[in-house]
Image: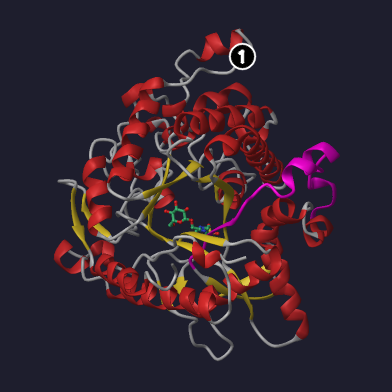
């Protein structure tokens, strides 16, 4: 198959809660992130580093035309963004819907907003890619039955997905069901650092069970994705065309030393971080190493369910930021009990350290990961996120922060790796979305970490291009004939 015939998508990614602000505009009701970022003040609890929330963020619900103009000025031919579930579905009549035993109605005001947004993108020659779920579960569903912990979520997610497909299917040809289900399950229900903040650790959360809930939540996420895709393929694709997949996040696990057993440890790490979701979706079963580790804590799919799950992605949606050196000796089930480090046996570091502890720049790992995915899952790859937060830049004045050398070097390495994977290794990579268009609300880090190629002055909401935006614009101009 000649993948090169299709247009390579180059652009930026964002997520609704990280940029939109205006939490009650257009009839929107709270998501679990609104709840999580507004704990009872009397409790003294703070769930974000600076105590702030996405209430304002980059004010993109109001500044969306400016954001699109910025994308255009950066030479992007595509934009990946997520829609806010509670702007698409109307939960204001929560009680009514429940009593009727039915599903909640569409929120026409929100749908109208996103349609205008899509039309403006298309007018500017920017191909939209929509993420349905980037972590903002309706609080109403959390309250109603425990959200992702309950199987009823599968029907509600499919209902939300249908509303989007039907409202935007004529304009959108690239769909992503879920963003990084590993993070939803592990950070939300294992470590309790993301909404809804559940964990066995009673210092962090009054309730939760880290040894069971993440696996149940993940199972329901996979089913939700799969049934949404089933609807899309049966009802939307025949009329409007388009492609759909899940987006998984993965780091690349590099064996710490050359002992043969360490290579197996690295595989176990890949199974837990990625195979947990990728194996059911692309191969039709959970990884054997996961089953061996968890026994009956890992839920089973019925024959009917797995038939829907298997093959439920048209492409491989990949978010990747870093690599880890791994060896035996870890205790953490969510990583496959691998021990991870950035420090090589000789004491040197794998790469340049970012502001966040989990991220170092290591482009060769990106190339290896792309090869691994192509070999293992045999689907064209859409890189849906990749980016860097330069260490210390949050403390810099704007005039200095816009000269983001570490981020430029990161992108230089990672964009070269993508070209090597395509041209030297023959891996079909079909998009590159950098994370992120703007500095924005960085979840548990609040506004203390900046991932944007655009500096946002949060006092004035003014946007200032960083050097990295110029670098990527030029990279794409220089190479656009190549991927195409
Ligand atoms: C992306 O995930 C998100 O999709 C995006 O919304 C976010 O803004 C961006 O990252 C930057 O952070 O708790 O120490 O085990 C990136 C993948 C995987 C990175 C989980 C953080 C948690 C590390 N993420 N990881 S830890």
Asked if 181 appears above or below 54 in the picture, the reply is below
Place of residue 279 in the rendered image (x, y in percent of width and height, measured from the top left) = 73, 56
Residue 83 x/y as whole percent: 43, 37
Q: Classify 36 as above or below 102.
A: below
238 or 437, which lies in front?
238
Assign a secondary structure to mark 1.
Answer: loop
Q: Is residue 467 left or right of residue 189?
A: left
Q: Residue furthest bottom?
A: 346
Q: Residue at x 41, y 38 (%)?
A: 37
- Quarter of the picture containing the C terminus is bottom left
Residue 295 included in the magenta stretch of the image: yes
- The residue under label 1 is 102
Q: Which residues are magenta?
A: 294-321
Q: Quadrant of residue 403?
A: bottom left
Scheme of colours in the image: secondary structure
In magenta segment, residue 196 = no
Q: Is residue 273 left or right of residue 175?
A: right
Dot 1 crowding, Cα within 10 Å, few <14, some 14–19, many 20+: few
The answer to whether one can see residue 337 in this image is: no
Residue at the image point whose x is 53% and y is 18% from the top: 104
Say which of 353 and 300 sits in front.
300
Kindly identify the residue that appears in the image at 56 percent across and 30 percent down: 162
Q: Nearer the viewer, residue 322 or 370?
A: 370
User: Looking at the image, which residue is at 44% across and 16% down?
Assistant: 92
Up-down relation of residue 62 to residue 79 (above or below): above
Residue 168: horizontal and vertical position, in percent? 45, 34
Compared to residue 364, the image places residue 218 above or below, namely above
Q: Position of residue 87 (x, y in %)?
A: 41, 28
Q: Quarter holding the N terminus? A: bottom right
């Amino acid at each position: 198959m000649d993948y090169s015939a299709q247009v390579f998508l180059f652009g930026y990614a964002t997520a609704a809660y990280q940029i939109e602000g205006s939490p009650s505009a257009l009839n929107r009701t709270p998501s679990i992130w609104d709840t999580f970022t507004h704990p009872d003040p009397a409790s003294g609890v703070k769930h974000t580093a600076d105590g702030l929330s996405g209430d304002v963020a980059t004010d993109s619900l109001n500044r969306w035309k400016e954001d699109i103009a910025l994308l255009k000025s950066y030479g992007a031919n595509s934009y990946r963004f997520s829609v806010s579930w509670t702007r698409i579905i109307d939960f204001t009549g929560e009680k009514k819907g429940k009593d009727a035993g039915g599903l909640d109605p569409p929120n026409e005001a929100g749908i109208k907003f996103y349609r205008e947004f899509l039309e403006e993108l298309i007018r500017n020659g920017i191909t939209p890619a929509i993420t349905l779920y980037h972590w903002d579960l309706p609080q109403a569903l959390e309250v109603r039955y425990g959200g992702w912990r309950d199987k009823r979520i599968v029907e509600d997610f499919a209902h939300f997905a249908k509303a989007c497909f039907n409202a935007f299917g004529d304009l959108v040809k690239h769909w992503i069901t879920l963003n990084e289900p590993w993070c939803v399950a592990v950070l939300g229900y294992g470590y309790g650092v993301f909404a809804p903040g559940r964990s066995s650790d009673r210092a962090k959360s009054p309730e939760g069970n880290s040894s069971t809930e993440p696996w149940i939540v993940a199972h329901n996420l996979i089913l939700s994705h799969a049934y949404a895709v089933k609807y899309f393929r049966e009802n939307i694709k025949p009329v409007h065309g388009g492609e759909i997949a899940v987006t998984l996040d993965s780091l690349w696990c590099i064996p710490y030393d050359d002992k043969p057993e360490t290579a197996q440890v690295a595989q176990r790490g890949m199974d837990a971080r990625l195979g947990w979701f990728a194996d059911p979706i692309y191969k039709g079963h959970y990884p054997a190493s996961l089953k061996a580790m968890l026994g009956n804590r890992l839920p089973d799919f019925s024959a009917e369910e797995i038939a829907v799950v298997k093959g439920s992605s048209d492409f491989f949606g990949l978010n990747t930021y870093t690599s880890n050196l791994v060896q035996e000796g870890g205790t953490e089930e969510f990583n496959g009990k691998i021990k991870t480090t950035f420090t090589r046996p000789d004491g040197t570091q794998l790469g340049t350290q970012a502001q966040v502890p989990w991220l170092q720049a290591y482009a060769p790992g990106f190339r290896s990961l792309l090869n691994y995915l192509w070999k293992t899952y045999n689907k064209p790859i859409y890189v849906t996120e990749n980016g860097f937060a330069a260490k210390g830049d949050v403390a810099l004045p704007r005039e200095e922060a816009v000269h983001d050398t570490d981020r430029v070097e990161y992108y230089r390495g990672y964009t070269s790796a993508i070209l090597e994977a395509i041209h030297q290794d023959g891996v079909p990579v079909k998009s590159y979305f950098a994370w992120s268009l703007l500095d924005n609300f960085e979840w548990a880090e609040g506004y203390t970490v900046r991932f944007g190629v655009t500096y946002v002055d949060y006092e004035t909401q003014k946007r200032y291009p960083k050097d990295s935006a110029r670098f990527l614009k030029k990279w794409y101009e220089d190479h656009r004939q190549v991927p195409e």
